[in-house]
Image (cartoon, rainbow, N blue to C red):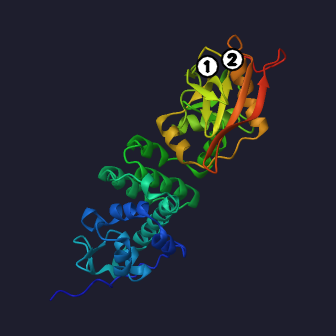
Amino acid sequence: MAPDNSMNIDISAKINADFAPLLQAAPKGVDRVYSCLFGKREAAIRRDVLLMAAKTQVEYQMILSGEYSYENGKIIPSPRFTQNESINPLQIEKKQEVEKLAGNVRMAVEALKDIPDDEISDKEVDDDFFARWRREAKAIGNEELQRLWGRLLAQEIQDPGTIPLRSLDVLRNISQNEARTFQKISRYIVSPGVLICNPKNEIFPPGILLKDIVTLLYTGLINNIESDLRGFSDKSKSINGFEYKVIKKDDLYFAVDSAKKIVIPGIMITTAGNTAFNICDRDHNDEADLKYMSSIICSYNENRFREMFVYKENFENNTHSFSKIYTHVQSFEDELKF
């Protein structure tokens, strides 16, 4: 009989203390995480059964590492497992990879734990996507970047096919500081994926310098700043009984009383930039931000309109309403001319 090697390894990297409660409490989205991690054959097994099989943190990480699998109620070595693991010179590296993978998985679980079941697709995550995600997750140890990487998996689980593989190729190479810079500019990005600014005159959002824009250009998150890039909006929306042309930003509408389309001046963000935008944390815009964005838009569209309203969309107590939170009137002294 072959020797029992199932416990002949000490993977001691700890999963954060609140990881197990998240798994026990989380809904359908976390079942999808298990489906990815444990394979389609085990996907039908409830996560509480899997937790029961992985009785300890060590056993769980043995499975997570890919070196062990769950077979017929037992944790056994995978075919590639080295028999004498104790002298394997790659063991320290393997432990680190498992710890990093577990951290990224935890961030995905955190992002999914409050998503209702009816907002989670029944479609499976593409095998190629998860293979690439997992390969990179083993190398990401920074907590901020793990939060980004975990949310990528969570978004793909929620709606498979929405994150292009090319976005993974770009986002796996960004640094912590680059991620922070993008998060700073994200509050000034409006639909359809335009960073509101005046690159010609080097007028950028508050706290953003030209060097920051150049950095994001090289990361592949924004497009060429030397081109005269811009977006357009001809969307109409009825707000408080009036019909406006609008630009949407999160729960805000930049609205004008005009029959003409709105030209949106600035820099277009890339496919990877749109992916990052959809999953990153964004601060709420204060009045200075609204003044900055409204002023540039009005200035560029001065022959179309000179007044812009900003409405906030509200959903409270099963009611839907709009509240006006800012009004901008273009002045002749405005210096933000293009």
Q: Residues within 10 Å of mark 1 (few under 14, many from 20)?
A: some
Q: Give me the disc on residue 300.
A: 2
Left or right, residue 231 beside residue 306: left
Which residue carries the number 1 mark?
263
- The residue at 32%/51% (across/down) is 123
- The residue under the point 14% across, 89% down is 1
User: Disc 2, disc 1: CB below 8 Å?
Assistant: yes
Task: Give percent across and percent down for residue 308.
Answer: 72, 24
Q: Secondary structure at mark 1?
A: strand
Question: Where residue 185 sits: x, y (%)?
Answer: 65, 39
Query: Is 322 placed left or right of 218 in the picture?
Result: right
Residue 243 at x, y percent in the picture: 63, 23
Image quadrant of residue 208? top right
Q: Nearer the viewer, residue 34 or 97?
A: 34
Height in image: 284 above or below 110?
A: above
Residue 294 position (above or below residue 141): above
Q: In what element is the residue under mark 2?
A: helix
User: Can residue 90 be seen in this snapshot?
Assistant: no
Disc marking residue 319: none
Task: Estimate how packed mark 2 is, as few (under 14), some (14 to 19) or many (20 or more) residues with alpha carbons within 10 Å.
Answer: some
Q: Amino acid at mark 2?
A: Tyr
* Quarter of the figure with residue 193: top right
Is residue 74 visible to the viewer in this orientation of the structure?
A: yes
Residue 117 sits above or below residue 66 on the image: above
